[in-house]
């Protein structure tokens, strides 16, 4: 995603409406590596600009996606997340805190299923699930919680 200043220029060039609300979303998304949901952004934007609507947040995100400035990602957690990194990359998700991190995977684009040959692949997305270093550290420190299953692990276990 381009810088907020370049985006303002691109918006005008595209004949799109440039408002202070939209410029705030540009700033919040620029170099944002947290993969926020629209609701996350709405909360952050509201703190800085009370009165901004969730609808405006969604509209701006959709416009930026149309312009190829960000991508939507679905990690299976329910809500769509927004990623200003439109380069080739994949994600690592912490099962404990939900943090989503960008990762690069060599050869991912050439991955193919060993069955389902009657399937045309448009893109390959790899999601690693595990525990981030911060959660691993606090897990080791909190000896009282050692061995306790997280809700995510319980949910997975009950599906089997
Ligand atoms: Zn974590
Ligand atoms: Zn990403």
Image (cartoon, rainbow, N blue to C red):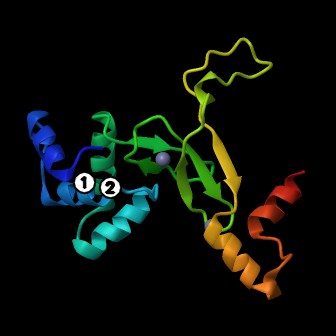
Q: Position of residue 40 (x, y in %)?
A: 42, 64
Give the secondary structure at mark 1: helix
- The residue that appears at 66% across and 72% down in the rendered structure is 135
Q: Is mark 1 within 8 Å of ligand 2?
A: no
Q: In the visual, does 142 lie left or right of 29?
A: right
Q: Residue furthest bottom?
A: 144
Q: Residue furthest front?
A: 106
For label 2, the crowd category at 10 Å Cα-Cα, with few meaning under 14, some 14 to 19 and many 20 or more, is: many
x, y (%) of residue 126? 63, 38
Q: Residue furthest top?
A: 118
Q: Is residue 85 above or below residue 100?
A: above
**Crowding at mark 1 (Cα within 10 Å: few <14, some 14-19, many 20+):** many
In what quadrant of the picture does the N terminus appear? top left
The secondary element bearing badge 2 is classed as helix
Q: Is residue 87 above or below residue 79?
A: above
Task: Please provide percent x and percent y for residue 77.
Answer: 61, 54
- Above or below: residue 95 compared with residue 92: below
Mark 2 vs ligand 2: CB below 8 Å: no
Closer to the camera, 140 or 38?
Answer: 140
**Number of numbered discs:** 2
Q: Which residue is mark 1?
A: 26
**102 to the left or right of 96:** left
Whether pointer 2 and pointer 1 mark residues with C-beta atoms closer than 8 Å, the reply is yes
Q: Residue at x 34, y 54 (%)?
A: 31
Instruction: Specify whether residue 68 is in view.
Output: yes
Determine which residue is flagged by label 2: 29
Q: Where does ligand 1 appear, by image quarter?
A: bottom right
At horizontal 86% and vertical 53% (from top left) the residue drawn is 159
The image shows residue 102 at horizontal and vertical percentages of 52, 49
Residue 133 is labelled as: none
Res 2 quadrant in image: top left
């Amino acid at each position: 995603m381009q810088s907020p200043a370049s985006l303002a220029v691109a918006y005008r060039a595209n004949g799109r409406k440039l408002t202070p609300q939209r410029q705030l979303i540009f700033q919040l998304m620029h170099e944002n590596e947290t993969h926020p949901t629209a609701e996350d952004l709405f909360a952050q934007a509201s703190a800085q600009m009370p009165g901004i609507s969730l609808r405006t947040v969604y509209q701006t995100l959709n416009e930026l996606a149309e312009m190829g400035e960000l991508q939507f990602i679905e990690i299976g957690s329910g809500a769509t997340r927004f990623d200003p990194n439109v380069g080739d990359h994949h994600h690592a998700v912490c099962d404990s805190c939900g943090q989503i991190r960008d990762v690069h995977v060599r050869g991912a684009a050439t991955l193919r299923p060993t069955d389902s040959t009657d399937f045309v692949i448009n893109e390959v997305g790899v999601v690693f699930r595990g525990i981030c270093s911060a959660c691993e550290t606090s897990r080791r420190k909190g000896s009282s919680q050692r061995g306790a299953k997280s809700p995510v692990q319980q949910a997975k276990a009950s599906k089997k």
